[in-house]
Image (cartoon, grey):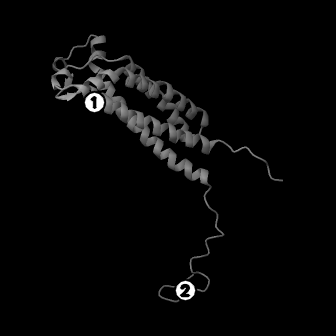
Amino acid sequence: MAARGGARAKGTDGNDFSHREKVASHYQISSVNKRRLKVSIFFHLLLFVFVLLKLSTEILNYFQISLKNLHNITLPKPALWEWLWLSSILFTIPAYLALRKNYVTPLKIYIGGTFVSGICPLISAIIYHSGDLKVFFMAEKADKVEKFYGIPIVLILSVFVAVTFLVHSLSLMFANNLVDAWTPKKGKKKM
């Protein structure tokens, strides 16, 4: 050890770290991807709240609850893909349970559920709104396009679908990286 203000001891130039143990790569991958998956699940929750707010008038009408302020807002009828996409939030629960204890099975449930109830409804949304998007791009006059506070609804939905597709794709990638990191490697045993 070097003393304060004194000369450095010989052989301690900082190059003596090569014998130390290093953190295994799967632990590093696990740590980074856990954090990234938590962030993507948080964005999924924000998108869920956005869709829930959009569908709130329909939900309140179903339960015959009347709010005077909501009658001034006109939103398009909810499509089936929006109702199906709402169920994708249920699969974040197994993901959080898996992240706490590095459980592979709940994370695989999250991957399958997010694909079926998250990605598939988004693909159907792209198909469902493709005609409206074509009308939006081909319209010479702005009055042909349905708007919400001056912004074309199809543009809002297209941005939502693109962002949501990105969030789901990234979360599936992070979850798949975690499954690979947490799954024991099978190979030849050294004797």
Percent of width and height locating residue 16 = 62, 75
Residue 39 placed where, x, y %? 42, 42
Secondary structure state at the residue bearing disc 1: helix
Query: Element under label 2?
Result: loop
**Residue 176 percent across, percent down from the top left:** 56, 39
Task: Specify the amino acid type for callout 1.
Answer: Ile
Query: Quarter of the image containing the N terminus?
Result: bottom right
Q: Is residue 6 above or below residue 60?
A: below
Give amino acid for label 2: Arg
Residue at left 68%, top 43%? 184
Mark 2 and mark 1 lie on one chain; the one further toward the N terminus is 2
Residue, far bottom:
7
The residue depicted at 63 percent of the width and 70 percent of the height is: 18
In the rendered view, would you say 122 is above or below 9? above
Task: Give the class, few, some or many, for how many residues have Cα within 10 Å of label 1's Cα (few <14, many ≥20).
Answer: few
User: Would residue 132 appear left or right of 168 to someone viewing this image?
Assistant: left
Q: Label 2 to label 1, Cα distance in Å?
A: 65 Å
Q: Which mark is residue 119?
A: none
Q: How many marks?
A: 2
Which residue corresponds to the image point at 41% horizontal and 24% vertical from the top-left?
A: 85
Q: Residue at x 20, y 19 (%)?
A: 74
> Residue 91 location in percent, x, y?
49, 29
Q: Is residue 83 left or right of residue 183?
A: left
Closer to viewer: mark 2 or mark 1 = 1
Q: Which mark is residue 156?
A: 1
45 horizontally vs 73: left or right: right
Q: Which residue is mark 2?
A: 8
Contact (CB < 8 A) between labels 2 and 1? no
